[in-house]
Amino acid sequence: MKKKLLLFMLCMLLALSGCAIEIPNENTDTKETDANLTRIAELEAELQQARAEHYINQSALTQEIEDLKAKIAVLTGKNENTDDSNSGTSAMVFHYTIENGSATITCYEGSATLVEIPATLDGYSVKKIGERAFEGNTALAAVVVPTGVEEIDWFAFYDCTSLLDITIPTTVTSIGHAVFDGCTHVTITCPAGSYAESYAKSYGITYRNQ
């Protein structure tokens, strides 16, 4: 009896002194695990985004380098046309941009009197003569637009005061406003029934059929 009483008293003392055994909380462990998994998923998403941004930036840098190479090629004369049959005295340099896989001439440098626009530039088919590309070139007397060109943009030959003749093929189906303003003596040479003929008639420009 005394032993049972002593054991009971010992248990009471332990309870009062707070020496209870702590039982692990399974809910707490589960919450911590879920939080860790969520954070891992967030970090993986950030890593994927960083990789994607790096790829985009790298691609943009590569394109910028290619653009610079093209500009350097123009400045160093890679696009020169030095055809001796032209009666001008300087090399011809055509500046261009690439649109939908084809070339648009944006500027011409040279003092040749006869200019035969190339059908291709560095492997790109010339589809368009851009806005103001030949503007103010007073040396031009005759221009031949190659088959394949589809558009001549606004003011392309504006104020080319010496221009006497321009040959335009049937592939040209769009000619912008005031392309030949200031070219008071120009004659458009073109096939009968072509868009160029209709353009010449509507603007009162002299034309002749090939």
Image (tube, grey):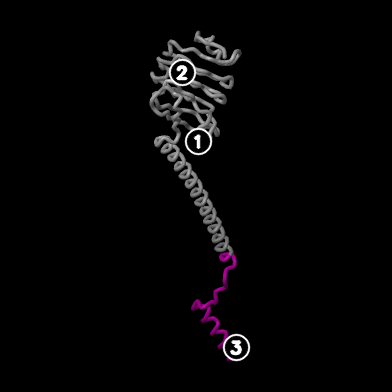
Magenta highlight: main SS: helix
In depth, the one of 200 and 7 nearer the eye is 200
Numbered circle sitting on residue 142: 2
Give the crowd class for mark 3: few <14, some 14-19, many >=20 residues within 10 Å.
few
Q: Secondary structure at mark 1?
A: loop
Q: Secondary structure at mark 3?
A: helix
Asked whether the residues under the numbered discs 1 and 3 touch, taking CB atoms below 8 Å apart as contact, a structural biologist would say no
Residue 25 position, x and y percent, is 57, 68
7, above or below 189, in the image: below
Task: Determine the residue positioned at 58% across, 22% down.
Answer: 171
Q: Residue furthest bottom?
A: 2
Is 95 in the magenta?
Answer: no
Q: Earlier in the sequence, mark 2 or mark 3?
A: 3
Task: Determine the residue positioned at 49% across, 17% down.
Answer: 166
Q: Secondary structure at mark 2?
A: strand
User: What's the amino acid at mark 1?
Assistant: Asp
Q: Which image quadrant for residue 110? A: top left
Is 7 in the magenta?
Answer: yes
Residue with the mark numbered 3:
4
Residue with the mark numbered 1:
122
Q: Quadrant of the C terminus?
A: top right
Task: Determine the residue positioned at 53% across, 35% down.
Answer: 123
Residue 72 position, x and y percent, is 41, 38
Give the crowd class for mark 1: few <14, some 14-19, many >=20 residues within 10 Å.
few
User: What's the amino acid at mark 2?
Assistant: Ala
Write down the region rendered in magenta: 1-29
User: What's the amino acid at mark 3?
Assistant: Lys
Front of the two marks 1 and 2 = 2
In depth, the one of 172 and 12 nearer the eye is 172
